Image (cartoon, grey):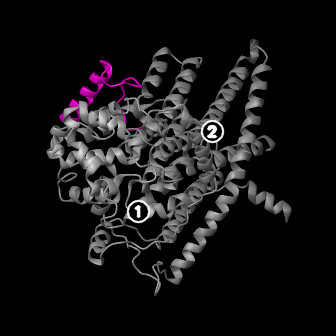
Amino acid sequence: MRQTLKTILKKDLSRRAFWVLAGLVVLAKLLLVHFQCIYTWIDGAPLDDELMFHAAQSITAGQWLGPYNWLTLSKHMFFPVWLALAHALHIPYLTAGQLLWCGASLASAMAFAPVLRQHKTRLALFILLAFNPASMASFTLRVYRDNIFPAECMLFFAGLIGYALRWRRPLALRQLHRSGLPWLALCGLGLALSWLTREDGIWLLPFLLAGGAVLIGMILCQKGLPALQKALRCALLTLPVLVLAAGVNIFCAVNQAWYGVYTLSDFSSGSFAAAFGAMTRIEQEHWQPLVSVPRDVREKLYDHVEELAPFRYWLEEYQPMRNGYLNKALGDYQTGSFYWVLRRTAQEEGVYADAPTAEAFWQRVADEINALCEDGTLPAAHGRRASTTPPIRAEYLGPVLQEGLRSLWYTATFQDCEASLSELTIGLPEDVAVWEEYLGSRANLAAVAGTADPYYSPLQELAFLLLHWVRCVYAALLPLAVLAALAVQLRQGWMLLRRKKGAPPAAGPQDAQMAETAADTADAWLLWAILAGVLGMALLRCFMIAFVEVASFNIGTYVMYLSTVHPLLILYAAAGLLTAWEGRAARRG
């Protein structure tokens, strides 16, 4: 019996069996998530869900993002394009998101094919990524961009990893599909989509830059490769950046055509960011966390900057504005609210009559504040900056470290990742029906009799119970798997260092064998670096979001902003352990 089990475990899947099983995995997941419902709050999320949904309706109507106001270009707006595309193709919103996630999971598994040579190990990696509980958590049921952002990021990672593990392949035009170039194109597509979907898509650049530097070093050190080939391979590494530039410029050109400004967002870049950054330069009388532009700084601005003088009424006296945006516990506007109330106030003052008017207004504000800081009229604590994020201060270090570690544990244990909603959709039935019809997905409107709790049918309850246990298994095993993968990686790193230190000098007939050994060692180091980079990016995201939480948001650890971390931890643990297992099995075989 034991021998039979060993034989079964050693036997690999055929190529056809792999693709059949992968298709069944996708169908199984789509069946389970079919029982989920969208969640929305009509008139309750004007900065988020409603902004995206109404922009998608405008795209469908041929009106791009709709009439211009203070919100139109406030965010990167690929998500409305995604909604409009799914609507045009008659693909339900939730199904479209899951198909994208399954595609990203499959791409990630296939990216490791050169080091996961068995179909069964690739299938295992695909299944582990596809059933990531965060990919079907309740926050993905909102009509918001984080339904697709983690998948877009994974396309980027899969593309770069896939190319890195295939970079030695020949660049023959007749067999271009067998080279690594399609993976570089996928990397660029993922980078562009991520950048166009969220303002913090820039967080992917460290992986691109570090990976590009490693690959350039390996290309330049490759013996026997002609100089022209080396130059060509290095030049090809710019493909993801070119795809990103193309995507951004297309979006900017469309915004120019419709609104008269060549920008991706007039919030995170351009004159508004310059104006907000200038405001945060001014030295505060009494610094407090979360508040970048406190009352004493605003009073100076009202007195010295003519364009901002009318803002005093709206920000300091108009109670509806203060009640909607002021943090009563702080007694002031926290950073995460202040930039929105600033734009809302500008809307009331007619600044957002059109995009060029708004762009010119905020540029005048930025220029005047910077001039006042530089001539000493306003005391400046910092140099010039153009950003809507608060300045980094030493006082944030401790809280950011604490929140970052909490975020890492929060994601590793899949907290707040239940697949069922605990709230009902809020809105009149006729309004919700408009959302349901456009999105092709049901909203959770049915309540348990006499309560405000959602009602779910027995089949829905069964599906949610299965998904609940999937989450529990992941939550129990992922922290252990990450630690095990880390231990394996540290051991492999030590062995590689010892191998390099003890390598004899190449000579005579040993040259060919030594060259092959050197290439194997270089590839082993490349895999080691890839896995280290994946773990590093998971940590970077945790601490980046921790800073935003500590310095701007103050909403508590929120899984939606951390949803790109879960797949990276799964990828690190699973790929690290599976490649080590395959390597050991190959040596024994």
Q: Position of residue 35 (x, y in %)?
A: 47, 74
Q: Is residue 422 visible?
A: yes
> Magenta residues, as a range?
360-389
Residue bearing the label numbered 1: 142
From this viewpoint, which residue is outermost toward the right? Answer: 2
**Residue 319 marker:** none
Indicate which disc, 2 or 1, sits on the residue closer to the N terminus: 1
Q: Tell me the quadrant of the picture where the C terminus can be found.
A: top right
The crowding category of the residue bearing disc 2, from other C-alpha atoms within 10 Å (few below 14, some 14 to 19, many at least 20), is: many
> Which amino acid lies under the numbered mark 1 shown in the image of this protein?
Arg
**Residue 531 marker:** 2
Q: Position of residue 456 (x, y in %)?
A: 49, 80
Circle 2 or circle 1, nearest the eye: 1
What separation in Å lies between label 2 and label 1 (alpha carbons)? 32 Å
- 533 on left or right of 151: right
> Image quadrant of residue 199?
top left
Q: Position of residue 546 (x, y in %)?
A: 53, 44
- 512 on left or right of 461: right
- Asked whether 174 falls inside the magenta stretch, the response is no
